[in-house]
Structures are given as structure tokens and as C-alpha cells.
Image (spheres, helix red, strand yellow):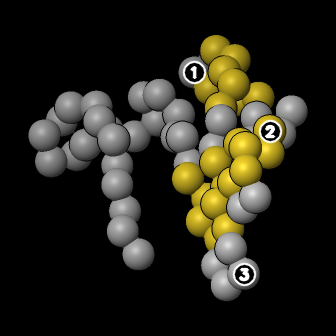
């Protein structure tokens, strides 16, 4: 189920399976007249911080 939060802001509900477990992810899509940005929720344990060896968020700036 997708949920329109406001004009230009929608939460998407995705079912996923990883590491033998089913999960529901909630990425968010934000847009206006010129651009759109998808905020990805990621999957728990799907990527680790290689520099420290610890699990953690991965942040990319464009």
C-alpha cells in the first residue's frame, strides 16, 4: 500500500525477503516540478561500514 503523505511526498510499502526473513520496507519518494528523490530505507545487515567493520548507515550525497 502506498501512502500519499502530502503533495510531492509519498511513502511506498514494499515486501522483501532477505537472509531468510520477510520484511516490509518503507522508502519515501519526494518530488517537485523539477526533480525527484527516493529515500531508500535499505535492508538491515545488507551493507556494513567497511572502514570500521561495524554495521551502520551508508549516506551518499549527490
Q: CA distance from mark 3 to mark 2?
A: 20 Å
Where residue 14 sits in the image (x, y, percent)? Answer: 76, 35
Residue at left 72%, top 61%? Answer: 8
Where residue 35 sits in the image (x, y, percent)? Answer: 64, 78
Q: Residues within 10 Å of mark 1 (few under 14, many from 20)?
A: few
Q: Secondary structure at mark 2?
A: strand
Split into 4 quadrants, where in the image is the N terminus?
A: top right
Q: CA distance from mark 1 to mark 2?
A: 27 Å
Identify which residue, 5 or 40, lies in the foreground: 5
User: Which label's residue is closer to the chain start, 3 or 2?
Assistant: 2
Q: Which residue is mark 2?
A: 3
- Callout in the foreground (3, 1): 3
Left or right of residue 45, residue 9 in this image: right
Q: Secondary structure at mark 3?
A: loop
Residue farthest front in this picture: 6
Compared to residue 2, the image places residue 39 above or below, namely below
Residue at left 25%, top 43%? Answer: 49
Left or right of residue 57, residue 22 in this image: right
Q: Which residue is mark 3?
A: 33
User: Which label's residue is closer to the chain start, 1 or 2?
Assistant: 2
Left or right of residue 10, residue 51 in this image: left
The answer to which quarter of the image holds residue 33 is bottom right
Where residue 9 sits in the image (x, y, percent)? Answer: 69, 54
Identify which residue, 15 or 50, lies in the foreground: 15
- Callout in the foreground (1, 2): 2
User: For the image shown, how many numbered marks are present on the structure?
Assistant: 3
The answer to which quarter of the image holds residue 22 is top right
Q: Residues within 10 Å of mark 2 (few under 14, many from 20)?
A: few
| Tag of residue 19 | 1
Q: Are marks 3 and 2 in contact (CB under 8 Å)?
A: no
Amino acid at each position: 500500500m502506498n501512502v500519499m503523505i502530502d503533495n510531492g511526498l509519498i511513502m511506498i510499502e514494499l515486501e522483501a525477503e532477505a537472509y531468510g526473513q520477510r520484511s516490509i520496507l518503507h522508502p519515501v519518494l519526494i518530488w517537485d516540478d523539477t526533480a525527484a528523490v527516493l529515500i531508500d530505507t535499505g535492508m538491515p545487515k545488507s551493507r556494513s561500514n567497511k572502514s570500521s567493520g561495524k554495521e551502520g548507515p551508508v549516506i551518499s550525497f549527490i
